[in-house]
Image (cartoon, rainbow, N blue to C red):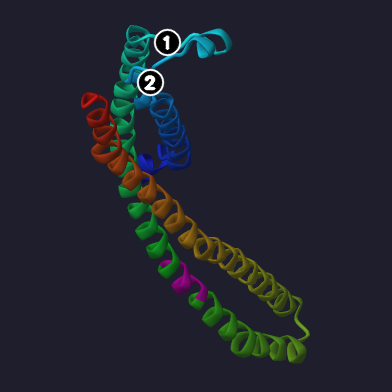
């Protein structure tokens, strides 16, 4: 079941999408200038050479549209936060599974090394001596068979060592994705709980 859930993990994609949502939100927030709500005195000269300033109704209309967008983004960010928390839980499971795999694979490698030592240093010399003395084709075949067995185990040991190296490299990668996700989660919390309410309060006081 855990393996099936881990296949659904798309933490990097979730982080990228959430990062874009955060950028969009701050872009919308920056578009509202509180000073735009304050009435400005215009002289005759400024009326001639400056562009017409939007009136309060136009500014409020823009603010309302942006507020709707920001509210929607806030909801999307909260959903993204929930998904990132789920991803982090799955990543933790993946890390533990990778750690267990690393420990088990070490045992298999040790078993291969022990078997290779036994075959090369004990059984092979014995069979070679028998074949040399007997000159029997079947004894010679037994030596060749043992060489093939040693070669197969040695290859299997090499494959296990490659898998172990992948497991070693995967551990810091998993942690790095987790840390990045946690940073994004904290940024969402800061935005939803602090940045947006402060911005809304500033506008409300105008």
State the predominant SS element of the stretch in magenta: helix
Q: In the structure shown, which secondary structural element does the residue marked by tag 2 occupy?
A: helix
30 or 18: nearer the eye? 30
Q: Earlier in the sequence, mark 2 or mark 1?
A: 2
**x and y, in percent, of residue 51 in the image:** 54, 11
Say whether marks 2 and 1 touch (CB < 8 Å). Answer: yes
Magenta extent? 104-109
What is the quadrant of the N terminus in the image? top left
As drawn, the label of residue 187 is: none
Q: Is residue 71 left or right of residue 109?
A: left
Inter-mark Cα distance, 2 to 1: 8 Å
Q: Per the image, is 50 magenta?
A: no
Residue closest to the far front: 44
164 or 158: nearer the eye? 164
Position above or below: 126 against 181: below
**x and y, in percent, of residue 205 in the image:** 21, 27
Q: Which residue is mark 1?
A: 54
Q: Residue at x 70, y 80 (%)?
A: 139
**x and y, in percent, of residue 136 in the image:** 75, 81
As drawn, the label of residue 36 is: 2
């Amino acid at each position: 079941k855990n393996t099936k859930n881990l296949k659904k993990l798309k933490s990097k994609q979730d982080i990228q999408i959430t990062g874009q949502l955060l950028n969009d939100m701050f872009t919308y927030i920056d578009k509202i200038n509180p000073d735009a709500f304050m009435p400005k005195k215009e002289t005759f000269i400024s009326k001639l050479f400056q562009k017409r300033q939007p009136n309060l109704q136009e500014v409020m209309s823009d603010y309302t549209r942006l507020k709707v967008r920001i509210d929607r983004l806030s909801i999307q960010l909260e959903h993204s936060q929930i998904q990132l928390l789920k991803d982090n839980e799955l990543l933790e499971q993946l890390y533990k599974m990778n750690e267990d795999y690393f420990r088990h694979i070490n045992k298999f490698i040790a078993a291969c090394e022990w078997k290779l030592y036994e075959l090369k240093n004990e059984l092979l010399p014995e069979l070679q001596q028998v074949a040399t003395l007997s000159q029997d084709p079947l004894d010679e075949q037994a030596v060749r068979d043992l060489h093939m067995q040693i070669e197969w185990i040695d290859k299997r040991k090499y494959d296990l060592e490659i898998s172990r190296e992948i497991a070693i490299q995967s551990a810091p990668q998993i942690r790095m994705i987790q840390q990045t996700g946690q940073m994004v989660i904290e940024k969402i919390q800061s935005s939803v709980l602090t940045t947006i309410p402060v911005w809304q309060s500033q506008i409300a006081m105008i």
